[in-house]
Amino acid sequence: MSLVELARYGSQLDADLARLMLEDEGIGAVVFDGQAHSFYGGFGLIPVRLMVLDEDYDEAFALLIADAKASERPARD
């Protein structure tokens, strides 16, 4: 079992939201580099990384893609 990088984010908040979404679906995830990102002021020098187990990568990636597509759809009136 090893951790692999699933995605990179420009903010701790975005990474945490993605982590929580995955955990709601039963996939464990960990956020790396959040403190270093905050320390350097979040100027894009150090991205916040979302990590998952290697065996969960494919399912987690599919969930992130589906979530991104859902958020792109315009809201109904």
Image (cartoon, rainbow, N blue to C red):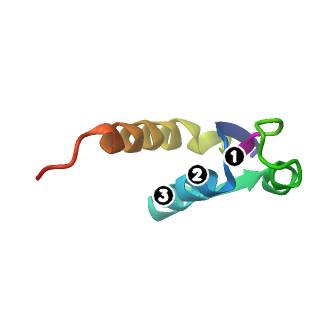
Q: Which residues are magenta?
A: 47-51
Q: Secondary structure at mark 3?
A: helix
Q: Secondary structure at mark 2?
A: helix
Name the amino acid type tagged 2. Answer: Asp
**What's the CA distance linking mark 1 and mark 3?**
13 Å
Magenta-drawn stretch, dominant element (helix, strand or loop): strand
Name the amino acid type tagged 1. Answer: Met
Q: Is residue 55 left or right of residue 34?
A: left
Which residue is nearer to you in this view: 4 or 46?
46
Q: Which mark is residue 14?
A: 2
**Crowding near the residue tagged with mark 3, few <14, some 14–19, many ≥20 C-alpha atoms within 10 Å:** some
Which residue is nearer to you in this view: 44 or 63?
44
Q: Which mark is residue 21?
A: 3
Q: For marks 2 and 3, give the one nearer the viewer.
A: 2
Q: Earlier in the sequence, mark 2 or mark 1?
A: 2
Q: Earlier in the sequence, mark 1 or mark 3?
A: 3
Which residue is rendered at x = 76% and y = 36% of the image?
A: 44
Circles 2 and 3, Cβ within 8 Å, touching? The answer is no
Residue assigned mark 1: 51
Say whether residue 21 is magenta.
no
**Crowding near the residue tagged with mark 1, few <14, some 14–19, many ≥20 C-alpha atoms within 10 Å:** many
